[in-house]
Image (cartoon, rainbow, N blue to C red):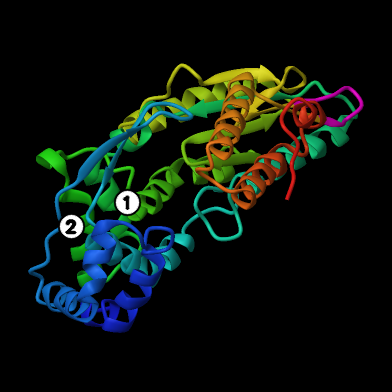
C-alpha cells in the first residue's frame, strides 16, 4: 500500500479514538483534540510528503513485575503508529507467525499460553501414563534492548512490505533516542509486533527442524516439552548458537532444563504435573506478594475516598479471576477483605 492509502483522514481518526481511551483527561490528548481536524489533516500532509518525523521520546520507569525503562512518544505519534499497526503491520506480520506464539495477538495472550502449556503436558503424560517429562525454558537477556536493527529490517523485508511501508518501518526502528542501532522502545505498539517476528526464526526452527510439538512462546519466554532430557540438552545448545549467530541475542540465567513434576515457572504461575496426570497451578511467591500489595493499596484508596466501591469491586474481581484456577485461590480470598458491590 502507498502512504496515501494507509494514512487517510479516516484511518488516523479511528486510531485517535483508540489511543484516547482511558487517557482523555491527559493534557496532551486534550490539546490534540482542541484542534482535532487540523491536527489530523497536518499529519496526513506530513506523512504523504515524507516530511514526517517522530517526536521526542519521554522516558519513565515502571517497577512491577521488575524495573523497566519505558520510552513513550507524544500522543500524535502514538496515533500514527496505531494507524500503521492496524492498517498494515498486524495482518502482514500475523501471517508469518506460528500458532503458539502467544503474546500481543488477537484471541491469544497469557490465558491462551497457559492453557496451551498445560494441554501439552497432559498430552505428553497420556503417551506413557507417567510424569517423567522434562522441559527446557529459554529466556532472552534484555530482549527488547538487544534487538539488532539491521537483522530486524532484513527479516521485515522478507514479509513483502511495499516501498512506502518500509519507509515508515525504517523510521519507527531507526529514529530512536541517541540514534542507537540496537534495541526497540518498550512504549511503542510497533515494537511489540517487531519483537514477535524477530524470534520467529527460533519458533520455526523448534517446530520444523527440532520437531518439538510441545512448544509455546510468550514474547521472549520459550518452553519446550519432551521426554528425552538429552534431546532437550541438544535443543538448548542449538537454540543458544542460533540466537547468538543469527540474531545477536544471548540467553539469560533463567534458562534451564528441569522435570515437570517439580514445576515450570511460566507467566506468574508454577505449573506442576502430578503423578496422576493432573496439573496444579500455583502462584509464584513474588506474584502472590504483589497481589496482596495491590489489594491492600486498593483498600487504603477506598478508605480515603480516592476510589469508589464500584471501582474496587471491578479491580478486585479482576484479581480474583486471575487466580481462580490456582491452588491458593480460596485461601487468598479468605485472607483479604471481602468483595462487595
Position of residue 63 measured from the top left corner of the image (x, y, whole percent): 41, 28
Marks 2 and 1: CB-CB under 8 Å? no
Q: Nearer the viewer, residue 21 or 209?
A: 21
Residue 89 belongs to the span the image colors magenta: no
Q: Which residues are magenta?
A: 272-279
Q: Residue at image x 34%, y 55%? A: 190
Q: Which residue is mark 1?
A: 188
Residue 278 belongs to the span the image colors magenta: yes
Tell me: residue 121, above or below residue 132.
below
Q: Residue at image x 18%, y 74%? A: 39
Q: Earlier in the sequence, mark 2 or mark 1?
A: 2
Q: Is residue 194 visible?
A: yes
In the drawing, does residue 324 fall left or right of residue 54? right
In the drawing, does residue 235 fall left or right of residue 175? right
Tell me: residue 178, above or below residue 311.
above
- Location of residue 87 (image quadrant): bottom left
Q: Total marks drawn?
A: 2
- Location of residue 335 (image quadrant): top right
Q: Is disc 2 surrounded by few (<14), some (14 to 19) or many (20+) residues within 10 Å?
A: few
Q: Nearer the viewer, mark 2 or mark 1?
A: 1
Q: Which residue is mark 2?
A: 171
- Location of residue 223 (image quadrant): top right
Q: Is residue 116 visible?
A: no
Q: Is disc 1 surrounded by few (<14), some (14 to 19) or many (20+) residues within 10 Å?
A: some
In the drawing, does residue 223 fall left or right of residue 200? right
Amino acid at each position: 500500500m502507498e502512504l496515501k492509502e494507509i494514512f487517510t483522514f479516516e484511518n488516523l481518526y479511528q486510531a485517535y479514538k483508540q489511543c484516547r481511551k482511558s487517557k482523555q483527561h491527559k493534557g496532551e490528548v486534550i490539546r490534540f483534540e482542541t484542534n482535532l481536524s487540523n491536527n489530523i489533516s497536518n499529519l496526513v500532509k506530513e506523512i504523504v510528503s515524507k516530511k514526517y518525523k517522530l517526536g521526542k521520546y519521554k522516558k519513565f520507569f515502571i517497577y512491577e513485575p521488575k524495573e523497566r525503562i519505558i520510552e513513550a512518544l507524544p500522543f500524535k505519534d502514538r496515533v500514527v503508529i496505531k494507524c500503521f499497526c492496524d492498517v498494515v503491520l498486524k495482518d502482514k506480520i500475523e501471517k508469518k507467525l506460528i500458532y503458539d506464539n502467544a503474546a500481543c495477538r488477537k484471541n491469544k495472550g497469557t490465558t491462551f499460553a497457559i492453557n496451551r502449556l498445560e494441554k501439552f503436558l497432559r498430552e505428553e503424560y497420556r503417551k506413557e501414563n507417567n510424569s517423567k517429562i522434562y522441559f527446557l525454558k529459554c529466556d532472552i537477556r534484555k530482549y527488547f534492548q538487544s534487538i539488532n536493527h539491521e537483522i530486524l529490517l532484513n527479516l521485515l523485508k522478507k514479509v513483502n512490505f511495499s516501498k512506502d511501508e518500509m519507509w515508515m518501518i525504517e523510521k519507527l526502528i531507526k529514529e530512536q533516542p541517541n540514534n542507537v542501532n540496537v534495541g526497540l522502545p518498550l512504549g511503542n505498539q510497533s515494537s511489540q509486533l517487531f519483537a514477535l517476528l524477530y524470534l520467529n526464526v527460533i519458533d520455526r526452527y523448534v517446530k520444523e527442524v527440532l520437531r518439538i510439538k510441545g512448544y509455546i512462546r510468550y514474547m521472549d519466554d520459550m518452553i519446550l516439552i519432551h521426554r528425552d532430557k538429552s534431546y532437550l540438552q541438544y535443543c538448548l545448545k542449538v537454540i543458544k548458537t542460533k540466537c547468538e549467530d543469527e540474531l545477536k541475542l544471548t540467553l539469560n540465567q533463567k534458562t534451564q532444563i528441569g522435570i515437570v513434576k517439580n514445576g515450570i515457572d511460566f507467566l506468574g504461575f508454577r505449573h506442576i504435573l502430578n503423578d496422576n496426570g493432573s496439573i496444579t497451578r500455583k502462584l509464584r511467591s513474588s506474584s502472590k506478594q504483589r497481589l496482596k500489595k495491590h489489594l491492600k493499596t486498593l483498600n487504603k484508596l477506598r478508605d480515603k475516598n480516592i476510589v469508589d466501591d464500584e471501582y474496587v469491586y471491578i479491580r478486585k474481581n479482576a484479581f480474583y479471576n486471575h487466580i481462580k484456577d490456582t491452588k491458593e485461590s480460596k485461601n487468598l480470598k479468605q485472607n483479604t477483605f471481602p468483595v462487595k458491590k
